[in-house]
Image (cartoon, helix red, strand yellow):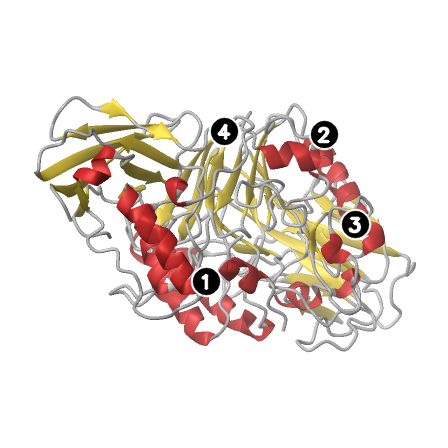
Amino acid sequence: MSSSLSRKRGRRPAVVAFLAVAIAGTTTTFLPTAAGAAPSEKSGWNANAYRGEVEVVRTQDGPADPAVLNGQVFVDRDRDSSSDSGERGLAGVTVSNGRDVVKTDARGRYRLPAYDNMTVFITQPSGYQVPVDGHNVAQFHYNHLPEGSPELKYGGIEPTGPLPDAVNFPLAESRLTETREQHCVIAGDLQPYDKEEVEYARKGAIRDLSKRDDYQGCGSLFIGDVVGDDLSLYPDVRDLTGMTNGPARFLPGNHDLDYDAEGPEHSFDTFRAKLAPAYYSYDAGNVHVVALNSVRYPCTPDVDNADGRRPECNDPDNRPRYNGRLDEQQLAWLKRDLANVGRDKLVVVASHIGLLNFADQGSAIHQVDQVRQVYDLLKGRKAVAVSGHSHSIENMKTGDLVKGWKDLFGVDGLPFPHITAGAISGDWYSGELTEDGYPIAVGRDGGRPGILTLDVKGNAFKERYTVTGQSDKAQTQLGVNSPHYREWYADRQAWNAKPEGTAPELGDPLVVDRADLAGDTWLTTNFWMGSTGSTVKVSLDGERARPADRTQPLRGEAQLVGPEWSDPHAAAQQLVNGGSLADRAMHLWRFALPGDLAVGEHRAEVTATDAYGRRFTDELTFRVVEKR
């Protein structure tokens, strides 16, 4: 784990309507993005979105039984968020209090046990849309915390008072969520630490989303670290989602915590008050999305470190830390939620800390303790896991395996695909600014900031990564890894640790000499969505294309780390400008340059083909000299 990553992860610091709130010498061939027209011109999301709120009913007498919450799910034909006479209830909708799960009856009614500090929510059914507020934030839940949160810096949940007589959930009929073709935006780690970084997001990925109109049904899911510790920025984030074109949903990350909460039961109160339940589910088309809370804070030795693998959790009073874990109530809810989901559906398991990931494959706290229990619940289902947290892009297929997963969790291979979705913030908004006003922020795997989309037909999907400000065809990054580069890497790393005298200079990274070619010199291709089943081929100077080798095959080996396994394009920037260091990646390919290349300029054409047969081309021009 890089020092930068450790630093960022460790930062502490009547009737009532209720509103739940490029490298030199590289040229790349781009094709126009498929989703480019502004929705105001094409589809009118802002004009036609179903805007409303959850209906909370209170009377002077209160509910007949204060231990039971009653309510109705109804079709809001006039879109006024009020259950008017003549508006039908909707049968078979799943409603939960975060523990129990029930289905509405023939008249759309439900009954749930009530308890303090619960969030009641519905699972949006396909063919219907929950309302969104003026910032496009989906409205589908009600927090019940009679006395409110304990005193918290960012406020938490205000006192809700006694249990309402009823909590009614409005829905509008929707062709957008009915169709079996869906485009689900998965947005990793927005994570602004201040208003300047909010503006970086606005000028970058959020501007890109504002130009797309393909995700109105499934919407966008921001998978944690919505902000960077400063929860007062939630209103700014809501302003950002107001620019998007579909319902926006959120799940919590370790930088969305109320750090001053004394226990896990209140650690996400401000998140719950401003954005969403800590966990929930929703449907669109033939997709069932399960949004999980995989962050337990503060973690404790009895619950989190019983096996001795998480010593970070041993002193919650003086050194509170978080751990990747689902509590028992959430696991019980997940089992009950999935019991109501048809086995023909695609289940998207979304979490901030991933069930498993490559970047942190050897860390117990940065993966989910109960990963095997989740696998058991999903056995036999069509599923994909998506996550954020590691600020890396990882496309891992069924059967993939690295040593840490087996050693820590006894996993013998992934039972279904896992995707780490990258980050809007990239490497925490670091590096030089682009001409559009947001940082390059190259990540720890050499990846670029961007957005993941799951393009779904029926229960089959194809993943698509869109680099901020680029076409969907921008999928690769090329470089040259030579002995000269690796020697400079080591010298510069040492100088960075103890900067004395003049910093070592790399020189032109696209120049190699005879000594380089006599050693191991590779043309590298960082294929961000590359995976098992992908191929990379290189044609030098127009000759027949030959295959490159993937550096990390994910067949049970340990993680390969160091300059010879690095992305030289990314690492050269990072060693000079700061940030993480791209010294490992599961999506890097290397092509050995022939030792007898003639002096002069050479052109490499690279064709990267993904597991679905989609081809992407990139070019790099480099120069051979006798001696530097």
Q: Which residue is mark 2?
A: 376
Is label 3 in contact with label 4 (beta carbons under 8 Å)?
Answer: no
Residue at x-position 24% and y-position 53% = 22
Tell me if residue 525 can be seen.
yes
Q: Secondary structure at mark 4?
A: loop
80 or 84: nearer the viewer: 80
Badge 1 density bin: few <14, some 14–19, many ≥20, Cα 10 Å: many
* Between discs 1 and 4, the one toward the N terminus: 1
Image spot of residue 247 (x, y percent):
51, 54
Q: Amino acid at mark 1?
A: Trp
Q: Secondary structure at mark 1?
A: loop
Q: Which residue is mark 3?
A: 305
* Callout in the foreground (1, 4): 1
* Callout in the foreground (3, 4): 3
Q: Which residue is mark 1?
A: 428
* Callout in the foreground (4, 2): 2
Q: CA distance from mark 1 to mark 4?
A: 36 Å
The numbered mark at residue 458 is 4
Indicate left or right for 522 with 47 as reference: left
